[in-house]
């Protein structure tokens, strides 16, 4: 075992010395290898950031895995009056910490240029965490907002522009019109989605239903509230079954109850960036192949200059295996060094704030660390290229006859 280790260390040291002697030729041939390794590693690393952006974007719309959706209505489409108590009982029974009512309606808001109906969503405080909602200004709802005399509202950037973008530190207000006017305090601003062109806002569900009671008219544009829960993925299917059973049993056969999982992870299989990774990976593989061919040429030229040296070593007892391994390790050591340079360059590129902002487009709040598998993949590719590039010269070195090599 010690002899094997010493032979390995000796071969690596010898290979490194040869690389240093022919460093100019080796460096030129390794540029392509380093660039290809950098490309492969960068693609995998940026793929992780892009995938996280997609995941977070989907979680903003459908909730985090696993998000359950529950709706209940009577046969005529009206909201069951017993539902608030059934909801509270279910949360306590199954110890669910992240849950929210969702009430969709409209509120008429008085702007300087007139009254406008604004899409309004009533939610509970956990909704912000469940849907990864990030704010440009201010903060998400807290439990303290439940006790405000003037209800708190979170508005989108279009709404904020209509108000003249006031400083939230001044506690700006907006007037909600209805049977009686209500003054609401703006406590936060979130970015409008790309397809949104009109003002919109969030309110706490209790505050909203106090202004606009839960709709019981089945002919109304807005139906009963729905309910969302964020639960562990491994028990989500079981909870779907038991919630369906419990709510249906409590409301009776005249009610229509629907419970299902709504987050993106329940419908998406595979990697959405797989085709891009494969395409760039194929291009990088071609560059690696060209770099390997250049290494083969350099190694063969170098080998011709070392034929006499190899013959002398063989005459003093060096085995064919030792010569084979030493020649091949020259290419492996060189490409590993190139691979390390390529991986370092990839890390600097992926971790660059400019690149992160460009890839994420402001949609990532939890940037993933640089994937270890990307660095390992780059080094494995570099090692494999070095082994392949050194195989042909190593075979040539082994087949050289000792007497011919000494006379060379």
Image (cartoon, rainbow, N blue to C red):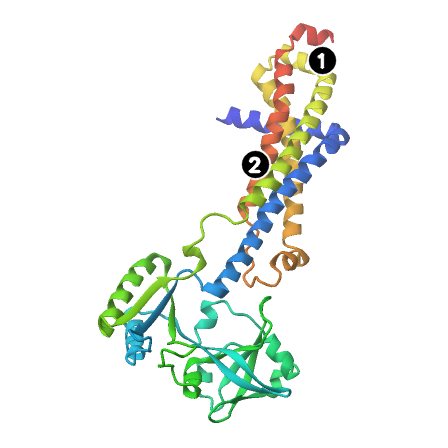
In depth, the one of 298 and 52 nearer the eye is 52
Residue at mark 2: 380
Tell which residue pokes out farthest to the front in this image: 219
Using the rendered image of the protein, determine whether residue 98 is visible from the camera's viewpoint.
no
Q: Position of residue 376 (x, y in %)?
A: 55, 41
User: Left or right of 254: which side holds 30?
Assistant: right
In depth, the one of 352 and 214 nearer the eye is 214
Label 2 neighbour load within 10 Å: few <14, some 14-19, many 20+: some
Up/down of 170 relative to 313, above or below: below
User: Left or right of 226: which side holds 112?
Assistant: right
User: Left or right of 391: which side holds 233?
Assistant: left
Write down the quadrant of residue 278 in the picture: top right
Tell which residue pokes out farthest to the bottom in this image: 180
Residue at x 48% of width, y 26% of height: 1
Up/down of 169 relative to 362, above or below: below
Q: Where is residue 189 in the image (x, y as percent from the top left)?
A: 58, 77
Q: Is mark 2 on a helix, strand or loop?
A: helix
Residue at x 70% of width, y 14% of height: 307
Identify the mark nearer the N-term, 1 or 2: 1
In depth, the one of 152 and 162 nearer the eye is 162
Q: Where is residue 52 in the image (x, y as percent from the top left)?
A: 53, 56
Asked if the residues shown at circle 1 and circle 2 are in contact, with their CB atoms under 8 angstroms apart, the answer is no
Label 1 neighbour load within 10 Å: few <14, some 14-19, many 20+: some
Q: Quadrant of the C terminus?
A: top right
Residue at mark 1: 308
Using the rendered image of the protein, determine whether residue 35 is visible from the camera's viewpoint.
yes
Q: Position of residue 330 (x, y in %)?
A: 65, 27
């Amino acid at each position: 075992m010690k002899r094997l280790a010493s032979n390995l260390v000796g071969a690596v040291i010898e290979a490194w010395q040869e690389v240093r002697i022919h460093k100019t030729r080796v460096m030129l041939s390794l540029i392509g290898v380093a660039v290809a390794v950098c490309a492969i590693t960068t693609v995998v690393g940026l793929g992780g950031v892009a995938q996280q952006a997609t995941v977070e974007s989907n979680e903003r719309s459908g909730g985090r895995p696993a998000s359950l959706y529950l709706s209940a209505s009577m046969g005529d489409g009206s909201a069951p009056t017993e539902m608030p108590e059934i909801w509270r009982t279910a949360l306590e029974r199954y110890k669910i910490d992240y849950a929210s009512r969702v009430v969709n309606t409209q509120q008429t808001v008085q702007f300087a240029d007139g009254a406008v109906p604004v899409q309004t969503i009533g939610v509970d405080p956990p909704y912000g965490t469940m849907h990864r909602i990030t704010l440009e200004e201010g903060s998400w709802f807290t439990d303290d907002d439940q006790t405000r005399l003037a209800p708190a509202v979170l508005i989108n950037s279009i709404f904020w522009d209509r108000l003249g973008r006031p400083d939230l530190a001044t506690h700006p207000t907006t007037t909600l019109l209805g049977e009686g006017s209500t003054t609401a305090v703006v406590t936060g601003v979130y970015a409008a989605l790309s397809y949104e062109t009109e003002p919109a806002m969030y309110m706490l569900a209790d505050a909203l239903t106090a202004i606009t009671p839960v709709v019981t008219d089945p002919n109304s544009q807005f139906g009963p509230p729905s309910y969302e829960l964020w639960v562990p993925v491994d028990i989500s299917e079981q909870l779907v079954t038991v919630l369906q059973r419990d709510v249906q049993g409590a409301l009776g056969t005249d009610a229509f109850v629907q419970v299902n999982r709504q987050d993106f992870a329940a419908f998406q299989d595979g990697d959405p960036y797989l085709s891009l990774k494969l395409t760039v990976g194929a291009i990088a593989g071609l560059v690696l192949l060209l770099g390997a061919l250049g290494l083969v040429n350099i190694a063969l030229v170098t080998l011709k200059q070392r034929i006499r040296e190899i013959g002398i070593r063989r005459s003093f007892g060096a085995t064919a295996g030792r010569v084979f391994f030493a020649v091949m390790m020259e290419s492996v050591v060189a490409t590993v060094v190139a691979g390390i340079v390529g991986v370092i360059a990839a890390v600097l590129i992926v971790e660059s704030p400019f690149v992160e902002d460009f890839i994420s487009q402001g949609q990532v709040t939890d940037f993933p660390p640089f994937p270890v598998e990307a660095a390992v993949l780059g080094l494995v590719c570099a090692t494999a290229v070095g082994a392949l590039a050194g195989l042909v010269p190593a075979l040539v070195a082994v087949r050289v006859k000792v007497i011919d090599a000494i006379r060379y």
